Amino acid sequence: MRDVTTAHPVQELDVQPSPLALLLLGRDADPRSERGVECPGDLPSPSDPDLVERARAAKEKLGEKVFVLGHHYQRDEVIQFADVTGDSFKLARDAAARPEAEYIVFCGVHFMAESADILTTDDQKVVLPDLAAGCSMADMATAEQVAECWDVLTEAGVAEQVVPVSYMNSSADIKAFTGRHGGTICTSSNAKRALEWAFEQGEKVLFLPDQHLGRNTAVRDMGMTLEDCVLYNPHKPNGGLTAQQLRDAKMILWRGHCSVHGRFSVESVNDVRARIPGVNVLVHPECKHEVVAAADYVGSTEYIIKALEAAPAGSKWAIGTELNLVRRLANRFAAQDKEIVFLDKTVCFCSTMNRIDLPHLVWTLESLAEGNLVNRIEVDPETEKYAKLALERMLALP
């Protein structure tokens, strides 16, 4: 007896890529998102031997009309053209202090350029060399998710007791949410002061979007316990928390993290101590709590730089932060006999920060020099109003 197979007609499915899939592929555009969007225009070839000279010539042609900001995590090839370097908030303030500059070219990531646009004048134009230079941490908290979280807090009867504190590494939408609800922004340098202020205003804090900075500041710097902290997961109903857990908590931490700092582990710390006797382990507070607890020193990017500047000759350091900065510091202090190594054995650059490369910078500067405004980052007036309010509360902190 033969097997008989019945052939069914093949049904063609009209499957269209989702907007998120398109963004992740670097196609389509969403100016309110930190995710990748296509960069318009033809970029110079990265193998062009004249890139450095082209960048220099375009920058000289623009003169005082352009002010180039370079974040510490940028490539050396980009940093060489920065008028100032620093962390995200320092650079935004530096931009605001240069009102004569028509163009602010921000070599960083999307949320940083947004902050610069918020703090600069209406006549200034903030430009991001590659629109796909976003931030995975900032992407972990969307305006819709945070609004839903506030509804959960309201239903639990605790919203009136909660003061939002948002890390600088967040979108303009999240900063605006923070401003509307009486909260403030913080940096990794002033997170403790921001939390102290918040607890003077209310009984609980909703900390967005980096759970590790929030937890480390609360427990390490302010004497709270891990039990005082709960983790709100926007991908679970009610954040994965009960109403009672929300009532009992002091710190409601958003489930977000930095993809670079989150990779360091206690094993990394133990390994470097075994390999380099007498090494000082210095990490960023975006690292996991157990890594921070195992380190010798903890601080912001600026703190890390100043600590190494003040370190004695012959000292040894393992640094837990982005590799571009660690490598730059190692080269800078090699002549002073300071041994500086990356905490983890695995090479780890910030992938989105590294999207700003020399071809993108050349394309940007040459376009501006020819009178073509490209890749402008512009925050709408309503969002800017409340985001600026939250930033101004931070600036007013004692």
Image (cartoon, rainbow, N blue to C red):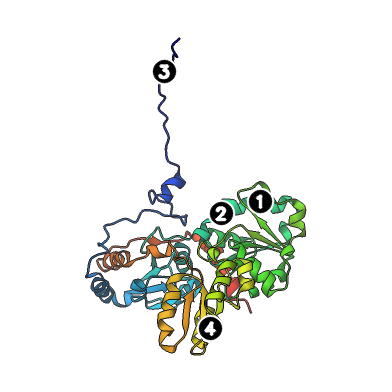
Cα separation, mark 2 vs mark 1, equals: 15 Å
- Front tag of 2 and 4: 4
Label 2 sits on residue = 143
Label 4 sits on residue = 307
Label 1 sits on residue = 239
Cα separation, mark 3 vs mark 4, equals: 73 Å
> Which numbered marker is on residue 7?
3
Q: Secondary structure at mark 3?
A: loop
Asked whether residue 124 is in view, the answer is no
Q: Secondary structure at mark 2?
A: helix
Give whichever of discs 4 and 1 has the lower sequence position.
Answer: 1
What amino acid is at disc 3? Ala
What amino acid is at disc 2? Ala
Give whichever of discs 2 and 4 has the lower sequence position.
Answer: 2
Residue at (58, 71) in percent of width and height:
270
Cα separation, mark 2 vs mark 3, equals: 49 Å
- Front tag of 3 and 4: 3
Give whichever of discs 2 and 1 has the lower sequence position.
Answer: 2
- Front tag of 1 and 3: 3
Residue 221 position, x and y percent, is: 67, 75
Placement of 276 over or under 107, stated as above or below: below
Residue 360 position, x and y percent, is: 32, 64
Position of residue 44 in the picture relative to residue 305 (left or right): left
Position of residue 223 in the picture relative to residue 267 (left or right): right
What amino acid is at disc 1? Gly
Q: Secondary structure at mark 1?
A: helix
Crowd class of label 3 (few under 14; some 14 to 19; many from 20; radius 10 Å):
few
Placement of 299 over or under 231, stated as above or below: below
- Most extreme residue toward the front is 1
